[in-house]
Amino acid sequence: MKRLCPVCFTELPENANYCLICGKCMRENVEQIVQYIGCSPVTTVVGINDCAIHVKDQNATSTNHNT
């Protein structure tokens, strides 16, 4: 399955965190927790959403041929 940048539609490597062309971050924090340890806040990211566009590779799965 291909991954595309939602801003510039560049094809991305499978585990890319940023677009190589425009720099858009492909990971978006969905949920985070802020706790205080002493007087200092500590932020923990609980969930991350992949912002990339996922496109199914037609060549790998297509079996329907029109003649």
Image: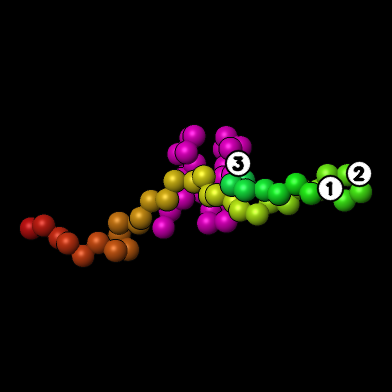
Instruction: Decide whether residue 54 is among the magenta residues.
Output: no
For the residues labelled 1 and 2, say whether their Cβ atoms are less than 8 Å apart: yes
The picture places residue 12, in percent across and down from the top left corner, at 51, 49
For the residues labelled 3 and 2, say whether their Cβ atoms are less than 8 Å apart: no
Label 2, residues with CA under 10 Å away: few <14, some 14-19, many ≥20 = few
Residue name at image x 51 percent, y 45 percent? 51
Secondary structure state at the residue bearing disc 1: strand
Residue pointed to by mark 3: 25
Q: In this rendering, would 27 be left or right of 39?
A: left
Residue type (three-letter) at the residue carrying disc 3: Cys
- Numbered circle sitting on residue 9: none
The picture places residue 3, in percent across and down from the top left corner, at 46, 50
Q: In this rendering, would 42 be left or right of 4?
A: right
Secondary structure state at the residue bearing disc 3: loop
Q: In this rendering, would 44 be left or right of 28?
A: right
Mark 1 → mark 2, Cα distance in angstroms: 6 Å
Residue pointed to by mark 1: 36
Residue pointed to by mark 2: 39
Magenta stretch in the rendered image: 1-28
Q: Answer yes or no: is residue 9 visible.
A: yes
